[in-house]
């Protein structure tokens, strides 16, 4: 993500150079930041129960469910916030939430 002046926002940037109010000016920037570290619940993916229907992937608000060659993979925990939407939409019970033990 960049500020108004085009400067890349990193952990080294001065607070004075961050966008006013933390406004995000460019789209698709969530990939650039590890945001899953404040998760309290963690989804567990059971490959034996999964039917690869892929209903979970598009419902994930953080794009934390990677899909490669039409097959969903395990969670990207760098971005998963443990919201549980994926577990709710899974009709096969292949995703369960547990307390995250960091």
Image: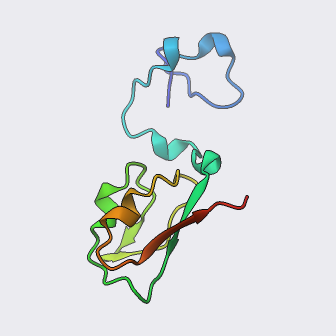
Residue drawn at x 49%, y 72% is 74
Residue drawn at x 40%, y 54% is 63
Residue drawn at x 73%, y 58% is 102
- Whether 42 is drawn above or below 51: the answer is above
Residue 7's quadrant in the figure?
top right
- Near-viewer residue (93 or 18): 93
- Near-viewer residue (82 or 7): 82
- Whether 96 is drawn above or below 41: the answer is below
Image coords of residue 90 (percent x, y):
32, 70
Answer left or right for 84 relative to 33.
left
Residue 58's quadrant in the figure?
bottom left
Answer left or right for 73 relative to 33.
left
- Near-viewer residue (57 or 14): 57
- Whether 13 is drawn above or below 82: the answer is above
Residue drawn at x 29%, y 71% is 54
- Whether 84 is drawn above or below 52: the answer is above
- What is the residue that sits farthest to the bottom in this orientation? 48
């Amino acid at each position: 993500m960049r500020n108004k002046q085009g400067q890349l926002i990193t952990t080294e940037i001065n607070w004075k150079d961050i966008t006013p109010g933390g406004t995000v000016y460019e789209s698709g920037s969530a990939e650039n930041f590890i945001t899953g570290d404040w998760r309290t619940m963690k989804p567990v993916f059971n490959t034996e129960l999964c039917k690869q229907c892929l209903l979970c992937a598009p419902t994930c608000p953080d794009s934390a469910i990677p899909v490669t060659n039409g097959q969903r993979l395990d969670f990207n925990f760098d971005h998963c916030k443990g919201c549980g939407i994926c577990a709710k939409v899974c009709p096969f019970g292949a995703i369960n939430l547990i307390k995250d033990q960091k």
